[in-house]
Image (cartoon, rainbow, N blue to C red):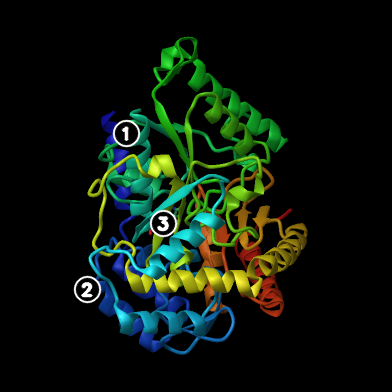
Amino acid sequence: MTDLKDKTVKELQSLIPDPEKIIKAADEWGLGPKSKDLIKRALKVESLGAMAFSEFETIPIIDRSGEGAVVYDVDGKSYIDLMAGFSVNNVGYKRKEILEAIVNQYEKLPQYAEMFSEERIKLGEKLCSITPGKYDKKVFYSLTGSEANEIAIKLVRIYTGKPYIITQYGDYHGRTIGTVPFTHSFSTWFQQYPIPSLDIGVARIPFPYGYRCPCGNFDDEEECANECLHYVDYMLSSSYYGLCDSSKGLCNISAFLIEPFQSAAGYYIPPKNWLPSLYKLAKEHGILFVVDEIQAGMGRTGKWWAIQHYPEIEPDITIIGKALGGGLPFQATIGRQEIMDSWGPGAHSSTFAGYFVGVAAALATVNYIEQSGLIEKTRVNGDYFIKLLNELKGKHPMIGDVQGKGFYIGIEFIKDREKTPAAKETTWLTMKLLQMGVMVKKAGYYRNRFAVSPPLTIEKDEIEKVVQILDKALSQTEENFNIKF
Ligand SMILES: Cc1ncc(COP(=O)(O)O)c(C=O)c1O
């Protein structure tokens, strides 16, 4: 065990960025003089725990948006944006209607003591009408996705009086003390080594990524999902595990808290039968079904919410955010009225929850998405993008798998036909693309994946340009690392 601890601590220390390497990489990858100067200043003032230090080998200092899906760094270099600021800028940049709504509301009253306003009530009515579930709903606002998840975590335990919540390995629900136990990946859960606070009342199940099935060696992804389901079924049925005992009608589980599609992990989409079967199991055992749509929602997958790809599923609570605020922090936890009314004022509160400027931005964002037909456009242009990426897959040995719905696209990179994850190679490719003017998020269980999430407004010609650049960058990466079919 000492050995394991030493190894883990060493591994964790290796996650702490090396300032020298960051400065050197800025030279190597050709960042401009202003970026380089600001990187040095950032290294003096920002904690090495800041996320910006982990995205790229060095840090482009992005400070403005352009026309279309383009952002610029301080040196004036443009990048086609495949990150949308972590899926926040779904409606693209420079949306006049959102800006006006924000300014008007700021002039009127920015915030007032967590009180209601007509606009806030209007937004609640709207969100209750567009989130899944044909039942009476209520809303609770918050500021960050982690907080919105914590609200759901508190609520399901208070409502059911049951301690356990089940989540999936690989899910991301936040990094606060309350949510870290629900975010299981090396770089988050293990950074709290040896154990994250509040890691009690949490049980985990596998997430069946068909290309690398965690439940056995299957070529067919539906078979993979079935095998993982057998495991969940057993967990829920066996009295030995102490979670549920169906023979006595007992169950200690309040809810499944899951990401329908795993976003921060790397844009993973499960096999078709996974979520409906999981939902069925939940209903059989009287377990609430809570979906975290913070990143996959707001139109990104070509529907308002990812869970709507499964019309038979009616989640009891839906957690939304990121793109909801049109660039401002604004989240909502929306669920069955009886659940949302199972606590009294003060069980949760935060000073800026439901602040009026955020309400105005959210209402303008939702209205824009509805009125502009952006979700339909996402479906059509997303399909086109996925088709072009699949064509690249036929040409490039490094692409192992392409998964996508709308502009929710994961690309898995491999070194060889044995599917060895291409982690180092993916980092190099990410930097090459940055140099060539495309900004994309590296992710993946093995850091060998792209999570492709452009603003939903990205146009066809921009998509074609990205594919051309990616084609070239992949050829260079494959040559550099000698990757062949
Ligand atoms: C699915 C999901 N849930 C929760 C969160 C946490 O949100 P925040 O970073 O605003 O706390 C994120 C953030 O990436 C997310 O992707």
Query: As displayed, is residue 89 above or below residue 96?
Result: above
The structure residue drawn at horizontal position 70% and vertical position 63%, both measured from the top left corner, is: 379
Query: As displayed, is residue 166 above or below residue 22?
Result: above
Q: Amino acid at mark 3?
A: Ala
Query: Percent from the top left, x then y, of residue 10?
Result: 30, 46
In the foreground, 101 or 234: 101
Of circles 3 and 2, the one toward us is 3
The 10 Å Cα crowd at callout 1, few under 14, some 14 to 19, many 20 or more, is: few
Of circles 1 and 2, the one toward us is 2
Query: Percent from the top left, x then y, of residue 98?
Result: 47, 79
Question: Does residue 17 appear left or right of residue 260 in this picture?
Answer: left
In the foreground, 257 or 3: 257
Q: Amino acid at mark 1?
A: Leu
Q: Secondary structure at mark 1?
A: helix
Residue at far front of view: 118
Find disc 2 in the rendering and name its residue: 45
Query: As displayed, is residue 192 above or below residue 484?
Result: above
Number of the label disc, if any, that sits on residue 135: none
Q: Amino acid at mark 2?
A: Val
Find disc 3 in the rendering and name its residue: 332
Find disc 1 in the rendering and name its residue: 4
Give the distance between the C-alpha atoms of the residues marked 3 and 1, in whole angstroms.
Answer: 40 Å
First along the sequence among labels 3 and 1: 1
Query: Percent from the top left, x then y, of residue 115?
Result: 28, 64
Question: Does residue 323 appear left or right of residue 112 in this picture?
Answer: right
The 10 Å Cα crowd at callout 3, few under 14, some 14 to 19, many 20 or more, is: many
